[in-house]
Image (cartoon, rainbow, N blue to C red):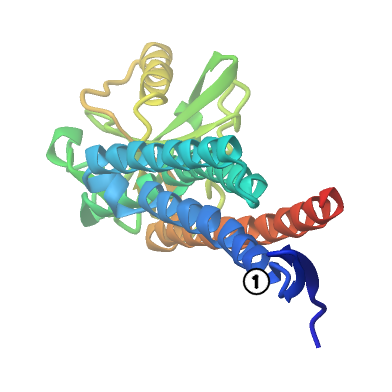
Amino acid sequence: MPAYESQPYGGKTVFARPRRSANFQAMFLSLVVPWLLFTFIFTVLSFTTHYQTPLIASMTVWMGLALVAIMGYFAYNAAKQGVGNSLWYFFIFISSLLALMAACAWGSYNFSKNMQPFYDVLSLNVYNSVDPQQFKGNQLMDMGRVSFTEDSRLDLTKSMGFRNNDVYCAAPIVSGNGSMASYDFWAVGMNCCSGHASDFACGEYNNPKAHAGLRLMRDDLRPYFRLAVQQAQAAYSLQATHPIFVYWMEDPHAEINAYQDEGYKQYLLGVFLHFAVQFFFVCAAGALFAKMG
């Protein structure tokens, strides 16, 4: 049987149930509200809403911030009026603010690192059986994934690296006897060559089954690889009119799916980890508030 507390009433002593149910309700809300806020913001920032309608994603974050501000207002009023569970109000406010910050940071990271490259490549075209000797770069400007002809390969003797803190390495993709009017398709990688010798060792450069490429999507890296190509043009007296940069590999489809898999893995990890951390802090706060009476 639950214990009862005595309370004075009209000169008599009466017994009332303790407010345990109110405390459990406060603990439940303290667990669920910040976690739901984190999950919602994390979802919006990680996936298609962020990619297709970034304005809506930004508005969602601001709405979350407004909701946290309202929680802060209620916490302040509860403390000012001496409400019994005012400490829980403050706990919900602080943990919701931390949940919002964590969701923004982790969601933005997951999107830029995993999901944005996946969506970018998925939105572009796929080209098959491309002969680098016959095609020019400006014919495949909308290329996301490409498979070259079976006789296509990397010409490692004409590779080059440009050093700017990191080393940006590039090697031309050739076919036939390797002599071409314009070298427009280049395999690239970072910190996988010395920068002063033809020692390109990026991606699946030594895989005899590799005849395909995944388009380089990062705009911030493209100028450095272009400088590496310009150095190769000067060193080897070759032309590269419309260079296109790809990561050399056997199966671009599996590679792009790996971005999606990692994005979902990060998302599930974030959701479950935040729930576990929030549960721990709710239990710790409950024990602390109980000691404080």
Q: Amino acid at mark 1?
A: Ser
Q: Secondary structure at mark 1?
A: helix
In the drawing, does residue 10 fall left or right of residue 266?
right
Query: Looking at the image, which residue is at 54% across and 52% down?
Result: 34
In this view, which residue lies farthest toward the right?
291
Q: Is residue 45 above or below residue 11?
A: above
When the figure is inspected, residue 75 is found, relative to residue 26, above or below; the finding is above
Residue for point 71% across, 69% down: 20
Image quadrant occupied by the N terminus: bottom right
Whether 5 is drawn above or below 216: the answer is: below
Q: Could you say which is closer to the camera, residue 289 or residue 99?
A: 289
> Can you give x and y, in whole percent of width and height, for residue 213 in the image?
37, 49
Which residue is under mark 1?
Answer: 21
Q: Is residue 61 left or right of residue 239?
A: right
> What residue appears at the point 27 percent right and 28 percent down from the top-left corner?
243
Residue 83 appears in the figure = yes
Question: Left or right: where does residue 145 sit relative to residue 83?
Answer: left
Q: How many marks?
A: 1
Residue 196 at x, y = what percent?
59, 16
Q: Residues within 10 Å of mark 1 (few under 14, many from 20)?
A: few
Q: Choose between 228 and 271: the one closer to the eye.
A: 271
User: Residue 200 lies in what quarter of the image?
Assistant: top right
Q: Could you say where residue 107 lies in the image, as x and y percent from the top left?
A: 47, 45
Q: Position of residue 265 (x, y in %)?
A: 54, 61
Give the residue displayed 56% in from the left and 50% down from the top: 206
Q: Nearer the viewer, residue 28 or 158?
A: 28
> In the displayed structure, does residue 199 sit left or right of residue 248?
right
Viewer can see residue 120 = no
